[in-house]
Amino acid sequence: MKLIDISGQQFGRLTVRERAVNNKHGKSRWRCTCSCGNETVVDGNSLRQGNTQSCGCLQKERTTAYKQKHGKSHLRIYSIWTSMRSRCSNQHHKDWQHYGGRGICVCPEWNCNFMSFYHWATVNGYSDNLTIDRIDVNGNYTPDNCRFVTQIQQQTNRRNNTDFPGVSTNRHSNRYHARLIIHGKFVLQKTFKTKIEAIIARIEAEKTFGIVIERK
């Protein structure tokens, strides 16, 4: 597929100057100049879909305005919203490679309007003990692809659950083994009928023994 040259085009506050090196997934990136004077490199899809419209200055201005307007910046749901947007648009975020770096974005309806996200959350089961989860882990943050679940439920929906550390399959019995070894000794060694049960047991054991494992 031939690449369309978007040099010179303007997207929000960004003016595209030239082609940059592709990201690690082979997707096009472009060097842009923001109207505030800063330079930034942005994925082509993010520009065309309207998910990135500045070097970050627009987001800061909007965030400040929202804080002053809705008075909900102290709530946990507000932190969920800001974190969701940041890992999809901020290349310096520690988890960006697993979200924005893979082309995952926040729909315009939510990205530019906290109250829109807030109202959706309040009628779709949000509570402070739950976390936001994408039903299709390769899909975007949109109203029809998101839900609120427990942390354990979210772990079972990870992309790498086909190879979940500490969980293995017995091909002969169609059972799933959950194991955890600490200092050379098994602190968990159980067999389950389903993979979900084995994964939950492994996660609970990690929590019990204070083991922290990041999974994307």
Image (spheres, rainbow, N blue to C red):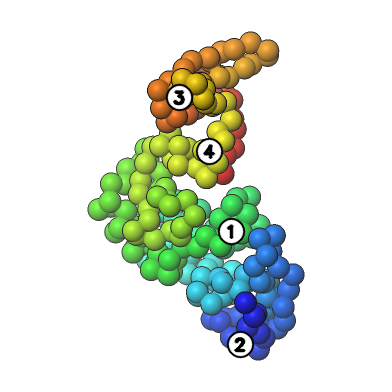
Which residue corresponds to mark 3? 174
Q: Which mark is residue 9?
A: 2
User: Looking at numbered disc 2 in the image, what kind of residue is underneath it?
Assistant: Gln
Which residue corresponds to mark 1? 102
Residue, far front: 172
Of marks 2 and 3, the one in the foreground: 3
Residue occupying the point 46% across, 20% down: 173
In primary-sequence order, the first of circles 3 and 4 is: 4
Question: Is 91 rendered above or below residue 186?
Answer: below
Which residue corresponds to mark 4? 162
Question: Is 34 rendered above or below residue 201?
Answer: below
Residue occupying the point 62% across, 77% down: 1
Give the structural element (helix, strand or loop) at label 3: loop
Give the structural element (helix, strand or loop) at label 2: loop
Q: Give percent across and percent down for residue 97.
A: 63, 54
In primary-sequence order, the first of circles 2 and 4 is: 2
User: Looking at numbered disc 3 in the image, what kind of residue is underneath it?
Assistant: Asn
